[in-house]
Image (tube, rainbow, N blue to C red):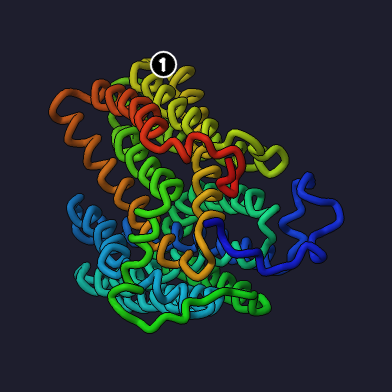
Amino acid sequence: MPADPPAESPAQTPADGPQSRWVAFKYPGFLRYWLARVSGNLAVQIVSIAVALQVYDLTRDPLDLGLVGLVLFLPSILLVLVTGTVADRFPRRTIMGVCLLVEAACATGLLLMTFEGLTSVLPIFGVLVVFGTARAFFGPAVQSLVTNLVPEDHLGQAIAWNSSGWQAATILGPVIGGLLYAVAPEVAYIGGLATFVFAAFMILSIARPSQKTTKEPASWETLVAGFKYIWKEKIVLGAITLDLFAVLLGGATALLPIYATDILDAGPTGLGVLRAAPGVGAVLTAVWLTRYPVRDHVGLAMFFFVGAFGLLIVVFGFSTTMWLSIPALALSGAADMISVYIRQTLVQLWTPDAMRGRVNAVNMVFIGASNELGEFRAGVMAAAIGTVHAVTIGGAATVGIAALWAKMFPELRRARHLDGRV
């Protein structure tokens, strides 16, 4: 069944209606939420790049860089049954604020250890376990809270603004972090700490929104309810698994250094441009969606743009010139943003509020796993059959997945509107 009614009544809807690009920001709670989310992600990027640079400076071992990502991601998997349940039982605004303050404390710990002088990476990994755990609890809460801050009619625009802000922070954060680290590692951690504190202040300053919490006693049934709901609701299942396999098969980020060095002869600067191109395309598209949202035949549109994403990856895979590779990657980011916008909105609107935390916890594990496994898939295939074949076959497989999922999930294909209605 569709999600519960939004927290705010129609009478509270701004007068200029859903056509306005800025209507979501006229809800004070959403404005502060958006600032908290963007600044929080910016802080994560700053601290993450500083940690990666510091770890590599200490050990010069690429394996340690891989362990950094693993330590940050593992808590999301290990705690998936807990993090979503917490987001459904307790105020999501409070969970976000506490998690941001814990991350600020982690940045403080890294700062103090750096001041004292580090000779081993083990203390860093110890802090990262806490940092990753905070991120694991933060994820379901931040994904679910937005539905409590804006009416259903404006949720699509709110998600588009969230996506554009997240992408912008993801692009700018490593650059800012790298520049701050170049001044001194301590400066990078101070920057991350200050940004985390600002994000926590913004989220905790929101008036407590209406939220439907689960009243069921804690049990195994309530813990696994998110998985059961996803399996039962085919629109949600189709949207989440489509994202999983599209990213798993179509991701080419891990192989961009090979393209920049050996295929396109573009060097480090070219690599930076290639890495930024999908994000730039995604940001511009997300901003465009705030003014011109997808209003009809959303199921078909989603499958179309997943297929377009795969096709553009194929074009990039065969390209041997930067003038073709950069537009292909930028357009792939744009196509991916449209499909992500539709998928995220469908999942949020089709999930009851009291269940959103648990569903989003599963969804975020799937997204994280697809990113991690997608890079692994690309590396293994590149080693076995070559880089170009690894990318092009992956892109073609994504096109096939879009066609197959459109056939396997007719309810999703027939969805006309973002609330799942046909």
Residue 154 percent coordinates (x, y): 69, 53
Q: Is residue 244 visible?
A: yes
Residue under the point 32% across and 57% down: 52
In what element is the residue under mark 1? loop
| Figure label count | 1
Residue situated in front as seen by the camera: 388 or 270: 388
- The three-letter amino acid code for the residue at tag 1 is Thr
Residue 276 percent coordinates (x, y): 48, 38
Does residue 128 appear to the left or right of 302 in the view shown? Answer: left
Q: Quadrant of the C terminus?
A: top right
Residue under the point 53% across and 78% down: 91
Residue 314 percent coordinates (x, y): 36, 21
Q: Is residue 334 above or below residue 225?
A: above
Q: Is residue 222 above or below residue 263?
A: below
Q: Quickly name the residue at label 1.
A: 321
Residue situated in front as seen by the camera: 399 or 186: 399
